[in-house]
Image: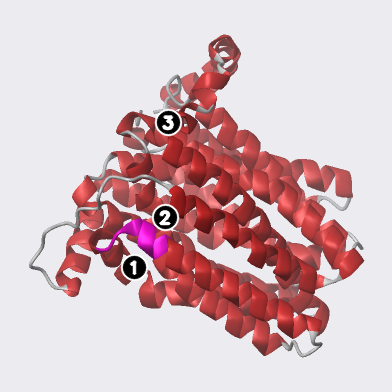
């Protein structure tokens, strides 16, 4: 085992240098050759840009109103709680109802919720409970949107383009993360948060139009005589009994609960530690997004030339180390560099776990398996936000971030460096 780990580490640099000779922009954007996926990609890019503006502005707004990091946790908890109530049911729905229809409905409702929040701020009526309640409503919509969105990818492309399409989805999402928070911070400071929410509402129009224009094969719902409960049980049993998928989903759970928890505290970190404002918060979020974009484009370009298992192992090791160093930094430029590195690490983890789970899941189970994947991803976010927000309220921001990073580092070493099965995944 030690020899395998040492071999992976010592051969990494030569292999990375050799990859440069295999780079091709055509390979990087391979999935865009499918017209339906092109519509999805550009429509989602505009919509997610607006969503990142809203998330950044919403977090800073509730912190500005309350001056309490605990309220950051409350808002995050409210947004994620519906995952526990509806996400698994959303997976069954995604296997029974045309996914495009589900997505048009969910995107329309999220647009209306953004306009409601904008109106409350414009009218100077907004209170912390408004933000928390609207976050809860958005969480309900997302519980049905996420499984359908994950499973919908295969309706737009052929199977050989799956890994590339998932990587491009991540690149699109993180391109928006790289620009949206910074734009949100600037607009928040210049024009006020209501304009961030208004722009987000308008951005949903792009993805709704893109979905309407797609020319898809007729949706054929999976024939079944099972009840919803039986379908849910089948999906859960499949994930539990499939050792590789079980470990990949567990990795997503640990990343969300511990590795990614520190994101909740960035608005407070920008003010209390770095002595900044809404713009500083936007820059911190943007640095993470730029790193994630770099990581996603790397995977999109070289996924056919790399061992996904080994790359996942290395990403899971370097990610918590970058967070520990970030927690020790008080210098904004260094903090931005470390967040950029953390963005690369986290997108390697999430992207490769997603693609490896989908590759090993049959079509008839995809909606339910991806609902479980999404359930873990989104469902643990509120608890991550709640525990780290409460801990920061009592112990300050630094200690909880250090503890969460060390917990994830221990997990990464235990699972990936002592489990040859995961390291061998292609």
Residue 327 is at least partly visible in this image:
no
Label 3 CA crowd tier, 10 Å (few <14, some 14–19, many 20+): many
The answer to whether residue 227 is left or right of residue 407 is left
Residue 102 among those drawn in magenta: yes
Vertical relation: 328 (above or below) 2: below
Query: Looking at the image, is mark 2 or mark 3 earlier in the sequence?
Result: 2
Give whichever of 347, 213 is nearer the camera. Answer: 213
Q: What residue did someone put label 3 on?
A: 308
Question: How much space separates mark 3 and mark 1, taking CA atoms?
Answer: 29 Å
Q: Depth check: 187 or 185 in front?
A: 187
Q: Position of residue 120 (x, y in %)?
A: 73, 85
Residue 132 figure quarter: bottom right
What residue is drawn where x is 58% and y is 54%?
206
**Residue at mark 1:** 90
Location of residue 181 (image quadrant): bottom right
Label 1 secondary element: helix
Q: Is residue 41 visible?
A: yes
Do the residues under discs 3 and 1 have CB atoms within 8 angstroms?
no
Is residue 183 inside the magenta stretch?
no
Secondary element under disc 3, as helix, strand or loop, is helix
**Residue 121 image position (x, y, % from top left):** 77, 81
**Residue depicted at 25% across the width and 45% down the height:** 361
Residue 159: horizontal and vertical position, in percent? 31, 34
Picture coordinates of residue 414 (x, y %)? 44, 45
- Mark 3, mark 1: which one is toward the viewer? 1
Residue at 66% across / 89% down in the picture?
Answer: 129
- Range covered by the magenta-colored residues: 97-103
- From this view, report whether residue 193 is shown above or below residue 9: below
Secondary structure at badge 2 equals: helix
């Amino acid at each position: 085992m030690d020899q395998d780990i040492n071999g992976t580490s010592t051969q990494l640099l030569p292999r990375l240098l050799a990859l440069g000779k295999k780079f091709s922009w055509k390979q990087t954007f391979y999935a865009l050759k499918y017209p339906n996926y092109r519509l999805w990609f550009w429509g989602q890019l505009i919509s997610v840009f607006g969503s990142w503006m809203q998330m950044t502005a919403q977090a800073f707004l509730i912190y500005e109103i309350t001056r309490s990091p605990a309220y950051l946790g409350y808002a995050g908890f409210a947004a994620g709680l519906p995952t526990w109530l509806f996400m698994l049911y959303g997976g069954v729905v995604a296997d029974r109802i045309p996914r495009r229809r589900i997505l048009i409905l969910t995107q329309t409702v999220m647009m209306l919720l953004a306009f409601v929040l904008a109106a409350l701020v414009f009218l100077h009526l907004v209170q912390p409970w408004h933000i928390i309640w609207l976050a809860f409503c958005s969480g309900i919509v997302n519980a049905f949107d996420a499984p359908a969105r994950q499973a919908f990818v295969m309706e737009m492309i052929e199977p050989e383009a799956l890994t590339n399409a998932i990587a491009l989805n991540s690149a699109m999402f993180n391109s928006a993360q790289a620009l949206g928070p910074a734009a949100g911070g600037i607009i928040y400071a210049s024009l006020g948060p209501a304009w961030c929410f208004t722009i987000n509402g308008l951005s949903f129009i792009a993805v709704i139009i893109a979905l309407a224009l797609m020319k898809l094969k007729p949706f054929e719902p999976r024939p079944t005589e099972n009840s919803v409960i039986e379908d849910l049980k089948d999906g859960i049993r499949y994930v539990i009994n499939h050792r590789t998928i079980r470990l990949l989903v567990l990795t997503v759970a640990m990343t969300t609960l511990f590795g990614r928890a520190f994101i909740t505290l960035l608005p407070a970190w920008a003010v209390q530690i770095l002595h900044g404002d809404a713009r500083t918060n936007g820059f911190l979020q943007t640095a993470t997004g730029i790193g994630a974009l770099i990581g996603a484009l790397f995977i999109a370009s070289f996924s056919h030339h790399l061992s996904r298992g080994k790359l996942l192992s290395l990403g899971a090791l370097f990610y918590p180390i970058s967070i520990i160093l970030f927690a020790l930094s008080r210098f904004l430029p260094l903090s931005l560099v470390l967040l950029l590195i953390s963005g690369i690490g986290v997108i390697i983890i999430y992207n490769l776990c997603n693609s490896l789970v989908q590759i090993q899941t049959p079509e008839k189970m995809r909606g339910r398996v991806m609902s479980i994947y999404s359930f873990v991803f989104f469902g643990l976010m509120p608890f991550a936000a709640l525990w780290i927000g409460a801990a920061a309220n009592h112990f300050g921001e630094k200690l909880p971030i250090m503890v969460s990073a060390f917990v994830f580092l221990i997990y990464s070493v235990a699972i990936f460096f002592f489990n040859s099965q995961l390291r061998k995944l292609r």
